[in-house]
Image (cartoon, rainbow, N blue to C red):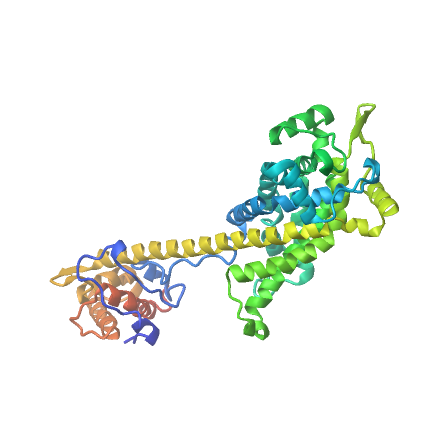
Amino acid sequence: QTPLSACCRSQVSRRTTTMVQPSTVQTATTVASTWKHPNTHLVLPPPAPEPISRSYGIGGFEGMVFSGFGPAVAAVLTNPFDVAKVRMQLQGEASSGSKKAYTGAFDCIIKTFKAEGIAGTQRGLSASIIREGSKNFFRIGLFHPILDVLHEDHTKSPPVWKRLIAGSISGAAGAIICNPIEIVKTRLQASSVGAGAVGYQGYQYKGFIDSFRVIVRDEGVKGLWTGTSISAVRSILATSTNMTVNSKSKEMLLQDPSLAWLGFQPGFLTDGFCSVLSAFFAVGANNPADVVRTRLYNQPFKMVDGVRRGEWYTGSVQCAGMILKDEGPLAFWKGFTGHFMRTGPHYVAAFIVIGWCQRTARTWKEKSNQKSWDRSMVAAFNKFAEPTEGGPRWTNASLQTALRTACPRAAVGCCEREYEALLRADAAAVLSAAGKGAEGALRYAEFVAASPALDAVVARRLANRA
């Protein structure tokens, strides 16, 4: 006889005595992920619900959608700081007269609000939402799939250098693909009126769609990819730093035993803390490239022999050289406060939403797999159950029928008389393992708990004959 383990016995609980239906049962899963013998699958579903993959909700298409959705939601909250960052980076530009209108990010937001109202502080919002959703679909969404390719040994933590490479690749992809939206967003946010106008003010578009129309009309399709190289550099610096710090710090807080005393658990607090930390390092790393990119995006242009040429800067290197010469090295960190005040809250909101979506998706998938397994187990029970006064039960006869399906006589290799005797003995062994007599019967919960014993009988009977 094959006794039930303590784990299996703990699954036995009181069930309804009416006909078993999938919507009315609640089952516990067994420890094993597959049966000992494949023939058991002829009468029973797998011993546990299908496990969800390690990367479900994080990698793949679902993860990419979540990666775009979170930042798009965050853009609504942080766009005023993005407007302030752009304008702070443009003021003092030598080519536009070195005009300075703001003393800091908050001063910029206040003055913008007074001069232009809420529309001014939320200038370029539609472009910002679309930009965040589309760019981060690739920038954040591709990070984990690329990292999985670079680091195939999922039993060990990926080293920092592999995280940096994965972030660099995903960051470059997002920047190149979404540069047209980036340039439209920058120009819309730079557009201002009155005393708050800084930098070049020649781009006055009617809206997001009009921006594309005018740029293509006046500058050609290539105009939409102005500054792509510096945008890619900026995104590489930002994404590699951001995703490396974020993923590594979260891993340490949740898995490092030496940090367990901090009490971090998967959830909003951990997502938020790691996001702020990664935002600080990301802003520090990419602000110089961000300043150069903003200047390139917003400069006026002229057509020379049918070729679009910037009037102030010929390229990223020349622009960086002019900034260094005219404004000094600290100019590369202009708008740092506004950048961080926008990026910090933005990362917090974005990664909290992303984390919530990932956890929700994994919970939903687990419940879905559990329900699917429940239905399969109920169907297996009802297939061989016999009606009794107390409801359907697996009797000795039910077990013999199931064993006859899983262990046909040809596979057992004996005569008919001996085969029938073996079926009766094996059925009694399963009932005994469940704490029943030879003529006992199993309710649904007892059947679920006794399923490993049934599998053990099948495996023993077909040993060396599979």
Q: Is residue 312 above or below residue 256?
A: above
Residue at 17% in and 62% down: 17
Residue at 58% in and 63% down: 250
Does the rendering let one see residue 226?
A: no
The location of residue 381, given as percent across then percent down, is 24, 59
Q: Is residue 408 above or below residue 135?
A: below
Count of marks placed on residues? 0
Does the rendering let one see residue 292?
A: yes
The location of residue 29, given as percent across then percent down, is 35, 64
Left or right: 13 as drawn, with respect to 107: left
Q: In which quarter of the view is residue 15 placed?
A: bottom left
Question: 59 or 103: nearer the eye?
Answer: 103
The location of residue 212, given as percent across then percent down, is 65, 29
Left or right: 431 as drawn, with respect to 313: left
Residue extending furthest toward the left: 389
Q: Is residue 119 above or below residue 15?
A: above
Question: 365 or 252: nearer the eye?
Answer: 252
Question: 418 or 269: nearer the eye?
Answer: 269
Residue extending furthest toward the right: 325
Residue extending furthest toward the front: 114
Left or right: 192 as drawn, with respect to 156: right
Left or right: 134 as drawn, with respect to 460: right
Question: 310 or 34: nearer the eye?
Answer: 310
The location of residue 52, given as percent across then percent down, is 45, 57
**Quadrant in which the C terminus appears:** bottom left
Q: In which quarter of the view is residue 449 placed?
A: bottom left
**Quadrant in which the N terminus appears:** bottom left
